[in-house]
Image: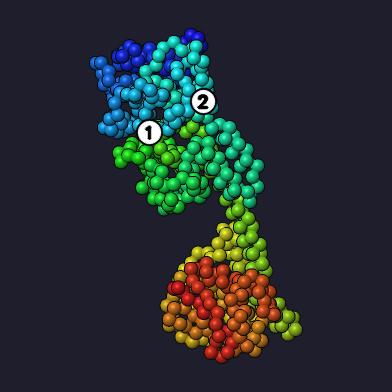
């Protein structure tokens, strides 16, 4: 097979002629091997499409460090160092530079495979391959070696050459890793997901990606630029991976300050992928080799979050994989945002329905005033008695406009201003049909002004007054007294049983009369102001509603 017909290209640099021939014999014919004796010759030969560089640790006229930097400066091609003697300092230096692996030529002539430094994925265990020469074929996707017959052997390999080939083929397979099928499966699954299936399918998507990439974690974080936090929305972790077997500390925090996330400011914030190696203290934040890969999720030209994949040992992350993970992350991000918007629309619809009920209920009070005074004017012919009816009609118009505005905005409270409680209470009593009821107040006048929405706060007292009349009778006496931290609205009725007091604020609770909306409205408005409301017994034995302005 000619070099042009070979499936893969290897550039091997070694001053030892015998080893060059051994490597050539071990890799061909599946590989087209260009074997040169020096760094200068390697630079000249590197203009072809090379799938892997392999260099001896000892070179004439150059160091392996300078050769590595020269050959990989503008390339993601794997680089393997072929060293004669184990050297811990050399391995550390190789790792820091970014060399994919260090393979040793074994000193024992009977060795079948080399010893590796373990910088990348583990080599196949010694003894599993019966390959004596390198003339078999290589399948990059399956990562398998088809063993040749003994008759195909042309060169007696040196110790470690077969293992070198196994390691090179593993690196190239990883380099050519393609998760396109998984990406398509994930996309199809999410596109067909019902609203209540999205969470489960996102979790499945993360697990599928982690399995495909042999990762120990696959996590999805959303980014809040106001708080500066990355918050985990979804995550898959390999629970079978023992912490002692991992070279990294898994990400376990649900919230991570963006400033503390590796490479956030340097790359993620610039919409670029981060690749970080947690096995060393001085790893750069690049996008090629490491134990952690974080790709940005960009939606509408804003950083919405990141998809994070971590592995037990450092590995190379090809550009194709980074791009595919970015596509998956953004697809998940759009799906999750679409789900959230739909959920928010449902919540808004629920609020609109509730506001419809609120409007209907709260209009009863001024409508009763209008009706009563119109009937009185009709019976007596005295139109001077219509002034309260006009005031009540104007009050209805104000309520309608403000409630509809609040419904559109989805808020329980509008704009606030300093208000006097005694004035609000008096106006609220005038807005309720109370011909036989009595209002008493205690220490309201000296109270400090309260920051509130005056219209909505008036509705609170109107509803409490109406509730007292509906449940305690038309001749009820209502007392509003100041406290150190708010007010108490009590009546002299029969009160509310202890076992029902926790339910009175529930939407639809009537206690035997009324519409079941008034107290729910009261609670909504009070909590909308940031206050608290509670129920107890009044001094007269009836119900007492306590509102705390500063809980």
Q: Position of residue 247 (x, y in %)?
A: 38, 42
Front-most of residues 487 and 305: 305
User: Are circles 2 and 1 on residues that touch, CB within 8 Å?
Assistant: no
In this rendering, is residue 537 above or below 347? Answer: below
Q: Residue at x 59, y 79 (%)?
A: 501
Q: Which mark is residue 144?
A: 2
Front-most of residues 283 and 457: 283
Q: Residue at x 34, y 24 (%)?
A: 108
Q: Secondary structure at mark 1?
A: loop
Q: Residue at x 47, y 83 (%)?
A: 482
Quadrant of the rendered image containing residue 460? bottom right
- Confirm whether residue 25 shows in the render: yes
Asked if residue 366 lies left or right of residue 207, the reply is: right
Render colour scheme: rainbow
Give the residue furthest to the top: 2
Asked if residue 546 lies left or right of residue 114, the reply is: right
How many numbered marks, from 0 up?
Answer: 2
Q: Secondary structure at mark 2?
A: strand
First reached walking from the N terminus: tag 2 or tag 1 = 1
Q: Which mark is residue 118?
A: 1
Give the residue furthest to the left: 61
Front-most of residues 216 and 226: 216
Q: Position of residue 530 (x, y in %)?
A: 48, 68
In this rendering, is residue 54 above or below 394? Answer: above
Q: Position of residue 380 (x, y in %)?
A: 73, 85
Instruction: Compute the Cα span from label 2 to label 1.
Output: 20 Å
Quadrant of the rendered image containing residue 294? top left
Q: Which mark is residue 6?
A: none
Q: Position of residue 148 (x, y in %)?
A: 51, 17
Asked if residue 74 lies left or right of residue 462, the reply is: left
- Within-10-Å neighbours for mark 2: few <14, some 14–19, many 20+: some
In this rendering, is residue 237 above or below 450? Answer: above
């Amino acid at each position: 097979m000619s070099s042009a017909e070979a499936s893969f290209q290897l550039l091997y640099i070694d001053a030892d002629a015998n080893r060059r021939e051994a490597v050539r014999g071990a890799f061909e014919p599946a590989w087209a091997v260009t074997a040169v004796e020096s760094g200068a010759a390697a630079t000249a030969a590197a203009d072809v499409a090379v799938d892997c560089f392999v260099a001896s640790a000892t070179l004439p006229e150059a160091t392996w460090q300078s050769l590595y930097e020269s050959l990989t400066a503008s390339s993601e091609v794997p680089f393997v160092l072929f060293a004669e003697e184990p050297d811990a300092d050399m391995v550390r230096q190789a790792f820091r530079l970014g060399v994919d692996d260090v393979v040793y030529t074994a000193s024992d002539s009977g060795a079948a495979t080399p010893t590796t430094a373990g910088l990348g994925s583990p080599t196949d265990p010694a003894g599993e391959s019966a390959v004596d020469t390198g003339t078999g074929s290589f399948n990059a996707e399956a990562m398998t070696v088809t063993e040749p017959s003994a008759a195909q052997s042309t060169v007696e390999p040196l110790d470690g050459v077969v293992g070198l080939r196994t390691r090179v083929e593993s690196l190239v397979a990883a380099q050519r890793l393609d998760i396109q099928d998984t990406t398509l499966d994930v996309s199809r699954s999410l596109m067909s997901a019902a609203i209540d299936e999205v969470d489960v399918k996102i979790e499945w998507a993360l697990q599928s990606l982690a399995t495909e990439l042999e990762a120990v974690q696959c996590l999805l974080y959303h980014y809040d630029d106001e708080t500066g936090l990355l918050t985990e929305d979804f995550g898959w972790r390999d629970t079978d991976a023992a912490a002692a077997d991992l070279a990294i500390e898994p990400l376990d925090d649900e919230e991570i300050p963006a400033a503390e996330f590796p490479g956030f400011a340097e790359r993620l914030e610039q919409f670029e992928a981060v690749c970080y190696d947690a096995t060393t203290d001085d790893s750069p934040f690049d996008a090629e080799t490491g134990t952690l890969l974080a790709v940005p999720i960009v939606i509408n030209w804003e950083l919405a979050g990141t998809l994070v994949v971590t592995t037990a040992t450092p590995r190379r992350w090809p550009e194709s994989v980074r791009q595919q993970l970015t596509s998956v992350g953004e697809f998940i991000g759009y799906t999750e945002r679409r789900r959230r918007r739909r959920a928010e629309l449902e919540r808004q619809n629920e609020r609109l329905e509730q506001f419809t009920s609120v409007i209907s209920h709260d209009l009863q009070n001024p409508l009763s005033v209008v009706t009563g005074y119109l009937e009185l004017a009709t019976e007596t012919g005295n139109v001077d008695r219509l002034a309260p009816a006009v005031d009540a009609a104007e009050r209805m118009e104000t309520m309608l406009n403000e409630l509809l505005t609040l419904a559109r905005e989805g808020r329980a409270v509008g704009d606030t201003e300093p208000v006097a409680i005694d004035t609000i209470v008096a106006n609220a009593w005038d807005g309720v049909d109370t011909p036989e009821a009595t209002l008493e107040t205690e220490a309201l006048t000296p109270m400090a002004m309260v920051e509130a929405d005056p219209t909505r706060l008036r509705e609170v007292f109107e509803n409490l007054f109406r509730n007292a009349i509906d449940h305690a009778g038309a001749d009820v006496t209502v007392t509003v007294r100041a406290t150190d931290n708010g007010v108490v609205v009590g009546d002299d009725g029969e009160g509310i049983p202890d076992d029902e007091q926790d339910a009175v604020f529930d939407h639809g609770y009537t206690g035997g009369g009324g519409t079941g909306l008034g107290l729910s409205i009261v609670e909504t408005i009070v909590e909308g102001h940031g206050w608290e409301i509670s129920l107890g017994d009044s001094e007269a034995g009836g119900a007492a509603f306590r509102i705390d302005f500063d809980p």
